[in-house]
Image (cartoon, helix red, strand yellow):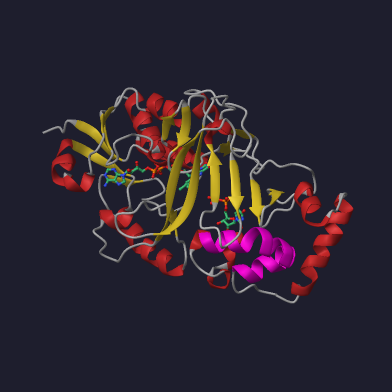
Amino acid sequence: MKATYDYLIVGAGLFGAVFAHEATRRGKRCLVVDKRPHAGGNIYCREMDGIQVHYYGAHIFHTDNRRVWDYVNRFVTFNRFTNSPLANFEGRLYNLPFNMNTFYQLWGTRTPEEARARIEQERAPYAGIAEPRNLEEQALKLGGRDIYERLIKGYTEKQWGRAATELPAFIIRRLPFRFTFDNNYFNDRYQGIPEGGYNALIDALLSECEVRLGTDYFAHRAELDALSDAVLFTGCIDEYFEYCFGRLEYRSLRFDHRVLETDNFQGNAVVNYTERSIPYTRIIEHKHFAFGTQPTTVVTYEYPDDFAPGKEPYYPVNDERNSRIYDRYRTLADNCVDVLFGGRLAQYTYADMDDTVEAALRLSEEVLR
Ligand code: FAD
Ligand code: UDP
């Protein structure tokens, strides 16, 4: 007997939504389920005091991929926001990424020549490190002690919950230095925030699909599987296979959203706090993503958090142990019939939104021919 749906899509995040849209427009019947009470996954925005709040952390769309940029622009209009975060260390402000403004603030260097000479001097004591054994050695070799101690060490140790000497070097294999006065955090050609927030994008993608929110796949697995011919699963891969090879590790985050009775709290969308003794890593002021003029403001303090069952898995810990476990799950996944796996949780990877859209488009082209 033919099932009610061609695809059951587990997860109404960006990956699930793009795949659902592509399948529906090719005539497939799709049911999308999500355990959260809203669609959008981590790009979901909640309106507070007339401001679109990035509820699960600041999201800036940036890409060099023309096809992805054209694709998302079919559904929403992007504003001209450019991410130019600041770092606050011991009360002094520094521009990011590391550029001529930062070098001037650190050392008073005024020209590229002066800045290059100063960085060479900073690196010189660490030139003997041939193969950095950890993140600290890597950072010192690339930028020297001053940049490391003011702008990297505290932030990184808070973010990952470990000493920099116990973190793998690959996390900061490259530290881009820009010898121009350019505070744009990204090098990509296209960048912006959807007007009206990210929900506008997700709602447009899902407009023709049936969506059931507040529905945990694992609580209704047999019943949901029976409804469809095939499944796209975008949740945690270890949970799908009932943790048979053990649990994958994550870093979690805690967000403290606050409405403040001022029209402008910090004058910038993102300010990082790079000292170890301050427990949060950054403060986000959401109205600046949209050049808002509301009389109040909403800020979010972002606290790194240890992961435990029941908490949200935000950052995969792609070290050797976890990569080995993931490979074993991947092999099981590759051998599943009529089940597709996609998205950051099923692929145990950190993927920016543009990579997520590209991956979902590729999968749809592959399987929906
Ligand atoms: P998700 O958004 O996680 O969606 C998965 C969905 O599956 C969730 O809604 C979840 O509830 C649902 N689900 C899971 N298990 C089940 C189940 N058992 N039953 C039902 N539903 C289930 N990218 C950028 O390009 N720019 C940025 O500035 C940026 N900032 C980021 C900041 C943070 C803090 C984080 C964590 C990520 C950031 N990203 C950014 C990456 C971006 O969030 C991802 O690319 C994108 O959200 C991935 O979409 P997804 O659908 O794969 O995953
Ligand atoms: N980082 C840092 N200082 C900062 C910002 C970032 O040392 O002020 C390092 C840190 O190790 C972090 C990594 O760069 O884990 C990536 O940070 P980014 O803000 O680019 O990514 P996100 O955490 O937003 O995904």
Q: Residue at x 65, y 67 (%)?
A: 138
Residue 337: tell me if it is visible: yes
In the foreground, 166 or 147: 147
Residue 212 position within the rendered picture, expressed as x and y whole percent measured from the top left: 24, 33
Report whether 256 appears left or right of 265. Answer: left
Q: Residue 181 location, x and y as percent?
A: 78, 43
Q: Nearer the viewer, residue 321 or 178?
A: 178
Task: Give x and y (percent) for residue 305.
Answer: 43, 58
Residue bounds of the magenta highlight: 135-158
Front residue of 238 and 338? 238
Image quadrant in which the C terminus is located: top left
| Residue 330, image x, y percentages | 35, 57
Q: Judge from the rendering whether residue 361 lies leftward or rightward of residue 26; answer left or right.
A: right
Magenta: main secondary structure: helix
Q: Quadrant of the N terminus?
A: top left
* Residue at (88, 49) in percent of width and height: 111
